[in-house]
């Protein structure tokens, strides 16, 4: 609901301006102005006008919040086709290999699971005078999209020109339809999709195109392994573990080190890194079997009575959410817990446990510094709300891939062993203290 009032304000202004107009032309593109009727859905409107649903969303981003009867939306008229340039004529490369066409325009696609049909359903069956709530699973995509829009405003002021197309990919079948069409063929910068299988399909389709950049914006799974033109923002789990171990060795850790996990491969890798020369570290470990509940009786033999450093190389929400309260309930023992970037997405972890256990996590969602302050000010002015971590992540990512000359220090992408793609190696480690997140020096 946080963006609803801002979008409705924009929508009301559009409606007032077009009450007496049957159609219009904006930037040389013809539109039909459609008045939303009760019980109508976006899919139904798209079918009636024989246009793609995503074309309606691009021109009317506020429809993501749901349709409101009586208001108006712009429908691109049939027969309008954007000008395209074949890949051979793309030039003026921007690092990392983002290209612009002869009109100095970056052609960008944003592929996210907005679940527009679910928001239509909420609005259609809302019997009150209040707008329906946003479908919960739409929120991450909506937050990310809002951050992209702020970044495009910033880039526009710096002289960059971006042709953005937004696509709703709520499931594999819809994404396959989009991929089989020509929607992405003229896009040289594609953000998303979020889901692993969908991104791999995108990589299989476009991995040999050197003039196209594929960005995995939020996934912590390795989706770039086979695609040299793919970039993964969230560091891979083993890279995160390397950062933990290096930090412990640099600090000359003196407490008991304990490795707890439910992923055998990540647990084994953590143990190997701890034993690496020239500063091997002693530790105890326990691998929890699938479905095994962490209990104090299992943990007591592993832990020191006074001070423990616990590494938890797990991306499993269920396992982590069961382990943290058990550790947090041990009143007489001090803990420093190292977790994974994926924990940033776990909304069921208790803040008291995170603070008491001094939880450390890598994060590409760090919301601090001058860039964030500038972003937050712009965001508040635009949306009358504070930005989420996903909005700021989108802002940084868009600035980096399009505005390399000014924002090229936000990330550091490199190729790793047995991986053709490019993974980000630049990220802070944050820790909880006094109910706030702080950056490890």
Image: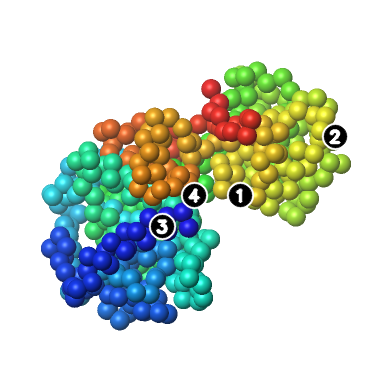
Closer to the eye: label 3 or 1: 3
Q: CA distance from mark 4 to mark 1?
A: 17 Å
Closer to the eye: label 1 or 2: 1
Q: CA distance from mark 2 to mark 3?
A: 55 Å
Percent coordinates x, y for residue 28 in the rendering: 12, 63
Q: Picture quarter containing residue 201? A: bottom left
Q: CA distance from mark 4 to mark 2?
A: 36 Å
Q: Is 119 rendered above or below residue 435? A: below
Element type where label 3 sits in the image: helix
- Which one is earlier in the sequence, the residue at label 4 or at label 1? 4
- Which one is earlier in the sequence, the residue at label 4 or at label 2? 4
Percent coordinates x, y for residue 400 in the rendering: 33, 39
Q: How many marks?
A: 4
Percent coordinates x, y for residue 422 in the rendering: 40, 41
Closer to the eye: label 4 or 3: 3
Dot 2 corresponds to which residue? 301
Closer to the eye: label 4 or 1: 1
Dot 3 corresponds to which residue? 5
Q: Is 336 rendered above or below residue 353? A: above
Which of the numbered marks, if any, corresponds to residue 219? 4
Q: Residue at (41%, 57%) from the top-left corner? A: 5
Q: Residue at (27%, 67%) from the top-left corner? A: 15
Q: CA distance from mark 1 to mark 2?
A: 30 Å
Decide if residue 206 is in sight here. Answer: no
Display coloring: rainbow
Q: Residue at (57%, 33%) from the top-left corner? A: 437
Percent coordinates x, y for residue 384 in the rendering: 41, 48
Lateral position of residue 357 relative to residue 397, left or right: right
Lateral position of residue 101 relative to residue 48, left or right: left
- Which one is earlier in the sequence, the residue at label 2 or at label 3? 3
């Amino acid at each position: 609901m946080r963006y609803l009032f801002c979008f409705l304000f924009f929508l009301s202004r559009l409606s007032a301006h077009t009450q007496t107009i049957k159609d219009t032309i904006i930037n040389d593109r013809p539109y039909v102005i459609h008045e939303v009727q009760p019980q109508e859905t976006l899919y139904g409107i798209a079918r009636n006008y024989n246009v793609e649903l995503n074309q309606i969303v691009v021109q009317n981003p506020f429809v993501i919040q749901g349709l409101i009867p009586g208001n108006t939306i712009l429908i691109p008229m049939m027969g309008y086709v954007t000008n395209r340039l074949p890949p051979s004529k793309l030039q003026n490369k921007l690092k990392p290999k983002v290209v612009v066409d002869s009109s100095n325009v970056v052609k960008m696609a944003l592929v996210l699971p907005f679940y527009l049909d679910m928001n239509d359903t909420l609005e259609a069956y809302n019997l009150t005078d209040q707008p329906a709530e946003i479908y919960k699973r739409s929120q991450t995509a909506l937050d990310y999209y809002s951050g992209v829009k702020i970044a495009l405003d910033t880039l526009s002021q710096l002289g960059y020109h971006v042709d953005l197309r937004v696509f709703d990919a709520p499931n594999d079948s819809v994404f396959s339809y989009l991929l089989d069409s020509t929607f992405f063929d003229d896009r040289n910068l594609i953000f998303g999709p979020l889901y692993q299988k969908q991104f791999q399909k995108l990589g299989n389709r476009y991995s040999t195109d050197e003039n196209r950049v594929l960005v995995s914006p939020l996934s912590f799974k390795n989706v770039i392994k086979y695609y040299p033109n793919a970039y993964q923002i969230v560091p891979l789990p083993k890279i995160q573990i390397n950062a933990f171990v290096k930090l412990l060795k640099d600090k000359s850790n003196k407490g008991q080190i304990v490795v707890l996990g439910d992923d055998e491969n990540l647990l084994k890798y953590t143990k190997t890194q701890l034993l690496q020369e020239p500063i091997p570290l002693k530790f105890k470990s326990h691998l929890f079997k699938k479905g095994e509940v962490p209990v104090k009786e299992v943990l007591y033999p592993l832990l020191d009575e006074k001070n423990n450093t616990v590494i938890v190389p797990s991306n499993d929400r269920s396992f982590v959410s069961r382990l943290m309260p058990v550790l947090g309930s041990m009143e007489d023992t001090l803990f420093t817990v190292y977790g994974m970037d994926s924990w940033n997405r776990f909304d069921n972890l208790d803040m008291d446990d995170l603070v008491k256990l001094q939880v450390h996590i890598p994060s590409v969602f760090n919301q601090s510094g001058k860039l964030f302050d500038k972003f937050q000010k712009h965001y508040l002015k635009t949306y009358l709300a504070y930005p989420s971590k996903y909005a700021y992540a989108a802002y940084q990512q868009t600035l980096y891939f399009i505005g390399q000359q000014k924002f090229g220090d936000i990330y550091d992408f490199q190729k790793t062993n047995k991986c053709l793609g490019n993974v980000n190696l630049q990220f802070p480690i944050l820790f909880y203290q006094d109910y706030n997140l702080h950056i490890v020096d």
